[in-house]
Image (spheres, rainbow, N blue to C red):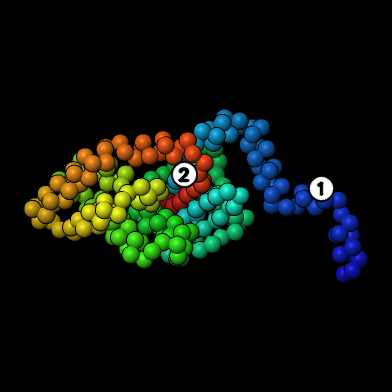
Amino acid sequence: SPSQLFKRIMENPDSMEEESFQTKMRQLYAEITASSPEVIARISELPPRIKVAKRFHENNLLVFIKKGLGLFTRGIIGDGNKPEDLIFESTLPLIECTKEAEAVPFSDLFWNSYYSVKELREGPGVAASEMSIERKALNNLNTLLQARTPELEAYYPFLRELREDILEYKTLSDYTLRRIANLNSMSTQKTKIQKTMDEMRKIRDELGTDYLDKVKARLGQLETEVIIAVENITE
């Protein structure tokens, strides 16, 4: 009604803000600061890209991206398998947990789901040919890791680094991506497994066994976007 509208307009802005989501977040932050200052100190030392999984009553993946002054929330919710834009307000109940809550291992679906969310974030700016090479390289790495081939076990840490690089940092050249994309990851023939091992050894020797640590250290000194991924996993 006109009278209620006039009353609303004339309300004290401070009292109106107490009802806002931003104020609720400030209050939660103040409570954590007062009760657990060590948590705030730990947060200040965390890297700009974090992934964690926890127990919840349904499976979903939330990804929060802060770039400049913008905050973007994307994810895969419930039984859906497609990433979607989300309202941060609606995701708060999905990510809240106690300080005592323990992290759990990621599900088998995490990396594929995480990659699909990042694809949605990147949008049409990546050329189709470039994306297809990157996607094939990522699929090959996932296949090699899931195959649990005994001969390749020593290369698993390096394979995981390559996968993280493709998903997070994108420092691999097109030439290296093509080499990974061309690996015969499905074969169980000893000669082809040996060929895969030889190629992985060459790539590791060229990049260095700790190359990704150096990338992270270098990026840690730069202003970068913040990406936080939270996976909820049912019991």
Q: Residue at point 89% right, 68% down?
A: 2
* Residue drawn at (36%, 47%) of the image: 171
Could you tell me residue 56's position as x and y percent?
49, 51
Question: Which quadrant of the view contains residue 115?
Answer: bottom left
Q: How many marks?
A: 2
> Who is closer to the viewer here, 99 or 28?
28
Residue mark closest to the camera, 1 vs 2: 2
Disc 1 crowd rating (10 Å Cα; few below 14, some 14-19, many 20+) is few
**Mark closer to the chain start, 1 or 2:** 1
Residue at the extreme bottom of the image, as rendered: 1
With respect to residue 47, does 143 lie above or below? Answer: below
Left or right of 157: which side holds 10?
right
25 versus 82 height, above or below: above
Give the structural element (helix, strand or loop) at label 1. helix
Residue ID for mark 1: 14
Residue 204: x %, y % from top left: 23, 42
99 versus 197 height, above or below:
above
Tell me which residue sits at (54%, 36%) in the image: 43
Instruction: Say which residue appears at 61% left-offset and 49% top-offset.
Output: 69
Question: In the image, what residue type sits under mark 2?
Answer: Arg
**Residue 92 showing in the rendered view:** no
Residue 13 in view of the camera: yes
Identify the residue under disc 2: 49
From the viewer's side, name the closer residue of 66 and 39.
66
Residue 88 position in % (x across, y down): 59, 55
Q: Distance from label 1 to label 2 (Cα)?
A: 35 Å
Tag 2, which secondary structure?
strand
Amino acid type for the residue under numbered disc 1: Asp
The residue lying toward the viewer, choosing from 137 and 86, is 137
The answer to whether residue 1 is left or right of residue 50 is right
